[in-house]
């Protein structure tokens, strides 16, 4: 199976920038999107052969997730089942016979770190507990914009970003917990090289200079490690300040 994840930073805008060309060319079995910034009633996406699963934020033009699925799941679930987290459309879960797929758009701690406490002490804990509970039933694949660069290798300028959102010790500890509790960062599992990023600021020509961050991930249960074939970053695909990421997995 080929699985793709992309923070499109607004699906309506991305559709005007060759989104469908990439979608059709990559021919994913499951294509996950974060930051749709739309409700399904606001945009028409013609995807024959795929079922669309939407989870939109209550607030218009904000957050939101979407999955295109070739094969219909056994079940679909929006949110974590925790009211304080579930108004922003950040999580969709699809259940299949052999695994769960979860796409997630993790809350940003904000430039002034005003949401860091919520992120560290509420969201990160509850999301990890949620996927661990799923894992008690069958293996889990989760993907999306996790809004954290885990290690210094995962961003161009680690020293100058140590107290910036996305690279605080608190957020990085949250990803440490993901790994220590049995999930594999698929790209880093297969690729130990630096200068591999998935997000670039629109400021200062950052993308053309590859001054970026790796904050978009596919993570899998340890039990799936031998089934992982490849993990890729599609940094040649434009249309958003993020690029798509993908895995091929025998599942």
Image: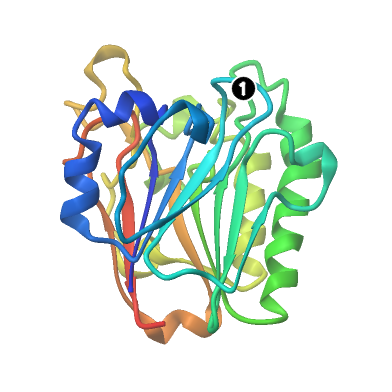
To which residue does mark 1 refer?
A: 110
Question: Who's the residue at 33% across and 52% down the image?
Answer: 245
**Quarter that holds the C terminus:** bottom left
The residue shown at (65%, 50%) is: 173
For the image, the number of numbered tags is: 1
Q: Is residue 117 above or below residue 79?
A: above
For residue 130, side relative to residue 214 (left or right): right
Mark 1 residue crowding within 10 angstroms, few (<14) / some (14–19) / many (20+): few
Q: Is residue 28 above or below residue 18?
A: below
Residue 151 locus on image (x, y percent)? 47, 49
Q: Residue 246 at x, y = what percent?
A: 32, 58
- Residue closest to the eye, 101 or 186: 101
At a point 60% along the width and 30% down the height, the residue shown is 108
Q: Secondary structure at mark 1?
A: loop
Residue 39 vs 140, above or below: the answer is: above
Q: Quadrant of residue 3?
A: bottom left
The outermost residue toward the right is 83
Rendered location of residue 53, percent (x, y): 52, 51
Colouring: rainbow
| Residue 123: percent from left, percent from top | 74, 44
> Residue at position x 31%, y 61% from top?
49
**Left or right: where 182 falls relative to 128:** left
Q: Nearer the viewer, residue 223 or 3?
A: 3
Left or right: 1 in relation to 118: left
Most foreground residue, 226 or 251: 251
Image quarter (top left, top right, bottom left or bottom right) of the N terminus: bottom left
Camera-side residue of 9 and 71: 71
Query: In the orientation shown, which residue stands out farthest toward the top?
Result: 204
User: Residue 167 lies in what quarter of the image?
Assistant: top right
């Amino acid at each position: 199976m080929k699985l793709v994840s992309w923070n499109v930073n607004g699906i309506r805008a991305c559709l005007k920038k060759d989104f469908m060309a990439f979608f059709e060319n990559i021919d994913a079995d499951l294509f996950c999107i974060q930051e749709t910034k739309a409700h399904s009633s606001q945009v028409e996406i013609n995807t024959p052969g795929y079922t669309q699963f939407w989870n939109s934020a209550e607030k218009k033009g904000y957050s939101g997730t979407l999955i295109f699925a070739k094969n219909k799941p056994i079940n679909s679930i929006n949110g974590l089942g925790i009211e304080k987290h579930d108004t922003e459309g950040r999580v969709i879960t699809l259940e299949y016979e052999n695994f769960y797929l979860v796409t997630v758009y993790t809350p940003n701690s904000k430039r002034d770190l005003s949401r860091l406490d919520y992120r560290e002490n509420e969201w990160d804990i509850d999301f990890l507990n949620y996927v661990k509970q799923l894992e008690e039933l069958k293996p889990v694949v989760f993907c999306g914009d996790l809004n954290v660069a885990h290690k210094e290798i995962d961003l161009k300028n680690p020293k100058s970003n140590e107290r910036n959102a996305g690279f605080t010790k608190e957020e990085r500890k949250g990803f440490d917990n993901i790994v220590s509790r049995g999930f594999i960062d698929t790209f880093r599992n297969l690729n130990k090289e630096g200068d591999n990023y998935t997000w670039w600021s629109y400021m200062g020509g950052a993308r053309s200079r590859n001054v970026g961050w790796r904050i978009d991930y596919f993570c899998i249960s340890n039990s799936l490690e031998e089934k992982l074939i490849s993990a890729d970053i599609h940094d040649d695909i434009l249309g958003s300040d993020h690029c798509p990421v993908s895995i091929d997995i025998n599942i």
